[in-house]
Image (cartoon, grey):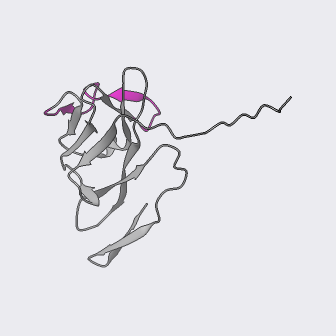
Amino acid sequence: MQPLLSLTLALPLLSASSILLTPHKPGFLLYDTVSLRCEDAPWWTVRRRTSSGGVRTCLSGWGSPGGAVSECLIKNLYPSDIGTYWCESESGEKSATVHIHITGRVSAGPLSVHFTVFGHGDRTPPSHGALQKESCVLQLM
């Protein structure tokens, strides 16, 4: 009798949606307006994990509706908006995440907010960089 061979493939799950953060720029300022939208999945919901560890959906104390059901606007970006954002379906499928956090303060200007994007399974953040403005160096994390 021939031995039975078994082959198991481990493939990453492909999400039916991705989260899109606009406008497209490397960083944001305090009080900027940003849009978080579930791309190609109008029935998904934008969610965020707060600094206290809770999970909240758009309109449950943060954000306002955008032009589509799956879009959430933050009209005045503020330190309380720091957190991890993603799209989620009713069945629990999740998109990649977007992290919004404050990276520093320039004495002559407002706080700067920077975002980084991590996909499922990413364990290491992108390489660090630095900006210089008016003799102050900001470290981007």
Q: For residue 138: magenta? A: no
Say which residue appears at 23% left-offset and 55% top-offset: 24
Q: In which quarter of the view is residue 1 placed? A: top right
Nearer-the-camera pick, 59 or 14: 14
Residue under the image location 28 percent in, 27 percent down: 61
**Does residue 8 appear left or right of residue 133 in this picture?**
right
Q: Position of residue 76 (x, y in %)?
A: 19, 44
Label the magenta part by its dominant secondary structure.
Answer: loop
Q: Quadrant of residue 108?
A: bottom left
Q: Nearer the viewer, residue 120 or 102?
A: 120
Q: Which residues are magenta?
A: 49-67
Percent position of residue 87, x then y: 35, 34
Residue 34, percent from left and from top: 21, 46
Quarter of the picture holding the C terminus:
bottom left
**In the current view of this chain or complex, which residue is farthest to the bottom?**
135
Residue 7: image location, x then y, percent? 68, 37
Residue at 39% from the left image edge and 42% from the top image edge: 83
Residue extending furthest toward the front: 1
- Image quadrant in which you'd find residue 95: top left
Q: Is residue 66 found inside the magenta-colored segment of the image?
A: yes
